[in-house]
Amino acid sequence: MVCYKRRMPLIECVPNISEGRRRDVIESTVTAVGRTPGVTVLDWSADAAHNRSVITLAGEGGPLREALLTLFERAIDVVDLTRHRGEHPRLGAVDVVPFVPVEASMAECVELARAVGAEIASRFGIPIYLYEEAASSAARRNLEDIRRGEFEGLAAKMQQAEWRPDYGPSMPHPTAGASVIGARMPLIAYNVNLGTDRLDVAKKIAAAVRFSSGGLRFVKAMGVSLDDRGLVQVSMNLTNFEKTPIFRVFELVKREAARYGVAVVESEIVGLVPAAALTAAAQWYLQLEGFRGDQVLEQRLRTVAASAPSSGGAGA
Amino acid sequence: MVCYKRRMPLIECVPNISEGRRRDVIESTVTAVGRTPGVTVLDWSADAAHNRSVITLAGEGGPLREALLTLFERAIDVVDLTRHRGEHPRLGAVDVVPFVPVEASMAECVELARAVGAEIASRFGIPIYLYEEAASSAARRNLEDIRRGEFEGLAAKMQQAEWRPDYGPSMPHPTAGASVIGARMPLIAYNVNLGTDRLDVAKKIAAAVRFSSGGLRFVKAMGVSLDDRGLVQVSMNLTNFEKTPIFRVFELVKREAARYGVAVVESEIVGLVPAAALTAAAQWYLQLEGFRGDQVLEQRLRTVAASAPSSGGAGA
């Protein structure tokens, strides 16, 4: 069979829903979303303490839009925020929906977030806030600011002019609250483990490297104990690996640790990481000059396959 | 359109033909080979001084076999070794055909090399030698050993019992000689540039790191001058990046250079490199523990897409 691979650019989408305990409800929702043609469920996980589930989807813009319509329809049906309890702050049944560029540009993800946000607002009567790269103003970039007060404080918050939603009614949906939709860079969960049990050292290093206390712009960090191993950890989220790359974070942590006479035992990436983040580290450490992405064999294969029709699947 | 991506594992194939001067002949040959359904021409280049062309193909085993039948048919037709002159040693019209694993295993590449070799020998009456991972004995692993004496010495060499071909007649094809077919790891062309114009330093470092004079097992190296830049270069081929990884070669060159008070200015990769070679460097330098290949987002996408039928191309 000849298969023309005229592909639109791939986008990742990571909706968070406010249900993490009823396994059957979660699984049937993931199944329904995953049945959308052209959409792949890369991963999903439910957290009972948070009473929240995270689903990682990949697909082109059109199929992702379809999948989200299905997700909202189901979540509105099964989640009642007036009765929802959990440790994680939340505003709505579908709490937050970030679109993340994989092959697409950030501009395409922003455009998609706005189009899907407007459609969901009008179809389901749910107020929609745009955040991060899709935000309509600087005051709305941060998810934490939008979510402050949570579902319980939402009706009062929406009375304020500066908290009118970007789309939809100026009052919460009675059981589904409001949703936050936007576009952001992929987030990398990155930890560095130190050869000491001194938690104060990990906390000092975390404070030194994180943005909020004067460190690198796209780093969130805290110091934690790994009691079972007798080590401490600098636990981080890297929110823009292109502008604050992994290798610079690692080298800075290592340098700060040396100040306390502590060595780095190892580092770890939790969950998914874009290939470009690792390739950039290899380039930097190897002092590679003039390297182009299409020198990566697999990348060249994809580029050539995408630019020309080719026959597929018929291996003789 | 729904497209079932039940893919066989991808293999790279890099045939070298003994024609590098007649542009029309080379281009029509590349075009004919590239028309094979399921085969992609990733790259090709012709060298007039060597009078030799290198074509890089990718595809599944079946389509690659078809492409090679086309290539041999054409090359036998247009190349006459009795009149061929060029700087590069050669034995045949299609001189050497390595199969290189991309998604496939080395065992699958060896199997393919043997099957294709046997078929070409019987169809075209050309003696075939198997080399590298596909070799029938240790004495035949090295291409240089098989090719020693070249086309001009081939008839005499084939009289010796130890140089009977693996497939086909025990005498050269009158105009197309013999061909060497096999399977090998991807070869990485890797150079390190040093901040000095002292060629002796580059030569000493090359001797220190290359296998032939006591260095790392899968490194070939020589020292050369970059006259236009006033630098010298350790120019290398890495013939097995899994067993002798780039980062270890780089660190050893850097250490040897320091011995002479010389700094590394930069390094460079010429041509294609497998993603795994760069990922391994990132893992080593970042001291990443417990990292799995399927944590790379693009890898996960391919794995999930390959394991389930999905709809393609129909982006709404």
Image: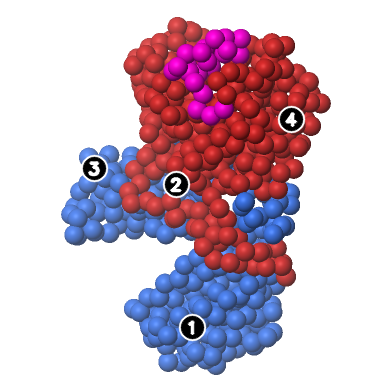
Chain colours: A blue, B red
Q: Is residue A211 visible?
A: no
Of mark 2 and mark 1, the one earlier in the sequence is 1
Q: Amino acid at mark 4?
A: Arg
Q: Tell me the CA gap for discs 3 and 1.
A: 48 Å
- Decide: few, some or many residues near mark 2? Use Cα within 10 Å; few <14, some 14-19, many ≥20: many
What is the chain identity of the residue bearing mark 2? A
Q: Nearer the viewer, residue A65 or A259?
A: A65
Query: Which label lies toward us, 3 or 2?
Result: 2
The residue wearing badge 1 is: A28
Residue at image location 40% in from the left, 13% down from the top: B207
Q: Which mark is residue A246?
A: 2
Q: Tell me the CA gap for discs 3 and 2.
A: 20 Å
Residue at image location 38% in from the left, 34% down from the top: B243
The answer to which quarter of the image holds residue A103 is: bottom right
Discs 2, 1 touching: Cβ within 8 Å: no
Query: Which label lies toward us, 2 or 1?
Result: 1
Q: Amino acid at mark 1?
A: Ser
Q: Nearer the viewer, residue A187 or B179?
A: B179
Q: Is residue B46 above or below residue B31?
A: above
Discs 4, 2 touching: Cβ within 8 Å: no
Give the residues in magenta.
B145-168
Q: Tell me the CA gap for discs 4 and 3.
A: 65 Å
The residue wearing badge 4 is: B74
Q: Is residue A81 above or below residue B311?
A: below
SS class of the residue under badge 4?
Answer: helix
Considering the image in quadrants, where does the N terminus of chain B appear?
Answer: bottom right
SS class of the residue under badge 3?
Answer: loop
Q: Tell me the CA gap for discs 1 and 4.
A: 58 Å
Q: Is residue B149 magenta?
A: yes
Q: Is residue B141 magenta?
A: no
Q: Position of residue B110 (x, y in %)?
A: 48, 38
